[in-house]
Amino acid sequence: MARRSRGRHIDGVLLLDKDTGMSSNFALQRVKRFFNANKAGHTGALDPLATGMLPICLGEATKFSQHLLDADKRYLVTAKLGQRTDTSDSDGEVVQTREINFTQEQLDAALEHFRGKTMQVPSMFSALKYQGQPLYKYAREGIEVPREARPINVFELNFISLEGDELTLDIHCSKGTYIRTITDDLGEMLGCGAHVVMLRRTQVAGYPYDNMVSLAQLEALVAKAEEESLTLSEVLDPLLLPMDTAVSDFKEINLSDDLAPFLMNGNPVQVANLPVDELVRITLGDEHKFVGIGQMNDDGLLAPKRLIVLRAESE
């Protein structure tokens, strides 16, 4: 007997504007429930303190979420100067208080230190794992474990304002960059200490800020659907971006429809002028229907890496 599918088949990417005070997994489960989706996954957790862009992949789009995990991010961060906390943010306990005494020139020099390619030691209050356990679990028990410095790239670090003891910055950075760590390190460099009091992710890859939607907005749309006897697909599905937006920066390889049966069964196909060792976005036919991503194999053929399940429009 076939197992009954839970939820509906719905594919796409929702740009959630996550609220503060909630975990990314909580936000993910709420979105999944609102859409009644059978499958969902997020693309890089935000701390409970943080707000902003959290792309949620639904259905077949989850197959490409890793590429958003690897994408560049942009943040707006406000740091409180003069206080250092054990978590480098306002959720932690203050461990040191110092006077704020630096010039604008010293601040500019300190900010320059963080621009470009550097090595960063991750915070103990991160989800990185050591011997199978997240670092934050060790931190909560007061255990310090070794962490290796990792390469990061800060493409832009823009000074926004300094009002009283609050410094606001705009940071465009590579994956794996911990803004809390930059804030803590900056505070130490300035000699006063600092911790994050506001963190907002404003961009992931090339996704537009204006397309974000909050849980409150989703809840209102679901209520509207119930009141007006509308379906979820009518009120919620228009908010979804196409699943191939997760790999929109990949070169497109468009194949003829007659190659579809071979490709969709996992077989490599012959393609002229295929870039070597480069993941490509595969589309079919004149309509350029997205079907997945692939890469040239050792035989010089386009081999599928991740393919979507093609379903009838009525499913």
Image: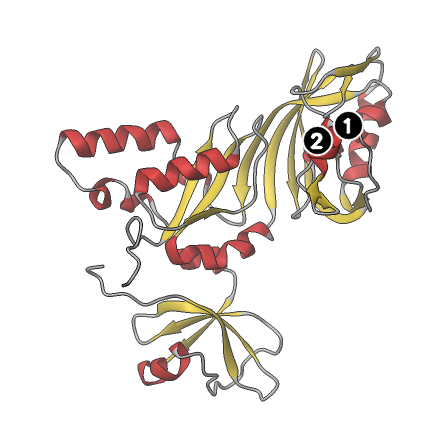
Count of marks placed on residues? 2
Locate residue 115: give its quadrant: top right
Dot 2 amino acid type: Arg
Q: Is residue 88 above or below residue 297?
A: above
Please tell me which residue is depicted at 50% across the width and 37% down the height of the picture: 25
Residue 108 location in percent, x, y? Answer: 79, 29
- Judging depth in this view, the residue of 234 and 315 nearest the camera is 315
Is the residue under label 2 in contact with that under label 1 (CB below 8 Å)? yes
Q: Is residue 313 left or right of residue 45?
A: left
* Picture quarter with the C terminus: bottom left
* Residue 125 in the figure: left or right of residue 220: right
Compared across the picture, whether 222 is left or right of 125 comes to: left
Name the residue beneath numbered marker 1.
184
Q: Callout 1, which amino acid?
A: Asp
**Residue 171 at x, y percent in the picture:** 65, 37
* 163 relative to 244, above or below: above
Q: Which mark is residue 23?
A: none
Give the image location of residue 176, x and y in percent: 68, 46
Residue 290, quarter of the rendered image? bottom left
Q: Residues within 10 Å of mark 2 (few under 14, many from 20)?
A: many
Foreground pick, 108 / 209:
209
| Residue named by callout 2 | 180
